[in-house]
């Protein structure tokens, strides 16, 4: 069973450590924002993580973000999915071009990081976005079973 530690945002009893951060926010402000807000006012995209025999899959809810608005990096066994630096400029320009009457759509700056399991193939990670869901597939490295190796001598 997997349990999410609400205070730290870390899944317990799982092979991966999952953390979240909202750039520019932290401490008690973030705690109260998370505690008193509903799903529609989150400052980070929610995720589903699952595994199959051949891969791990991370799905993020990213409706409203374009392909150039999201940056995915892998470094030191950690995959990070974040809003791209150019994203803020695009949003600011969009807001300046419009005379806003009502504004309820929120596309916040975000960053989510996940430790990759030891059997993941970081070089073969793929990402695809369909209908507002970003799907990141992390293939698993197949472990070879120890077996008998034939040795040929003198040919």
Image: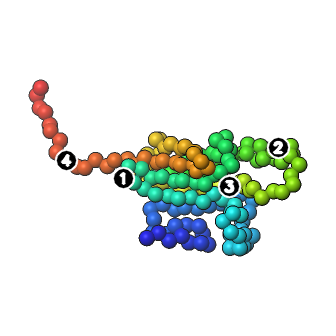
> Helix, strand, or loop for circle 4?
loop
> Helix, strand, or loop for circle 1?
loop
User: What numbered label is drawn on residue 98?
Assistant: none
> Helix, strand, or loop for circle 3?
loop
Identity of the residue drawn at 50% across and 58% down: 49
**In terms of sequence position, does the residue under pointer 2 or pointer 3 come before the other?**
2
Q: Eyeballing the image, is 41 above or below 95? A: below
Identity of the residue drawn at 83% across and 48% down: 95
Identity of the residue drawn at 55% across and 67% down: 10
List the single residue furthest toward the right: 99
User: Viewer-proximal residue, 95 or 21?
Assistant: 95
The image shows residue 152 at horizontal and vertical percentages of: 13, 33
User: What numbered label is drawn on residue 147?
Assistant: 4
Alpha carbon separation for disc pair 2 and 3: 19 Å
Q: Are marks 2 and 1 in contact (CB under 8 Å)?
A: no
The residue singled out by tag 3 in the image is 110
Question: What crowding class fits label 1: few (fewer than 14 Cα within 10 Å), some (14-19), or many (20 or more)?
Answer: few
Question: What crowding class fits label 4: few (fewer than 14 Cα within 10 Å), some (14-19), or many (20 or more)?
Answer: few
């Amino acid at each position: 069973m997997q349990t999410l530690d609400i205070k730290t945002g870390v899944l317990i009893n799982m092979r991966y450590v999952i953390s979240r951060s909202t750039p520019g926010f932290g401490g008690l402000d973030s705690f109260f924002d998370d505690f008193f807000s509903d799903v529609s006012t989150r400052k980070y995209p929610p995720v589903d993580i699952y595994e199959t025999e051949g891969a791990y899959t991370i799905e993020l809810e990213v409706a409203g973000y374009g392909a150039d608005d999201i940056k995915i990096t892998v470094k030191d066994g950690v995959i990070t999915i974040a809003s791209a630096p150019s994203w803020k400029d695009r949003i600011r320009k969009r807001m300046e071009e419009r005379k806003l009457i009502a504004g309820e759509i929120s596309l916040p700056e975000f960053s989510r990081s996940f430790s990759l399991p030891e059997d993941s193939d970081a070089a073969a990670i793929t990402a695809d976005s369909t209908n507002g869901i970003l799907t990141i597939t992390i293939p698993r490295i197949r472990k070879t079973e120890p077996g008998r190796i034939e040795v040929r001598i003198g040919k």
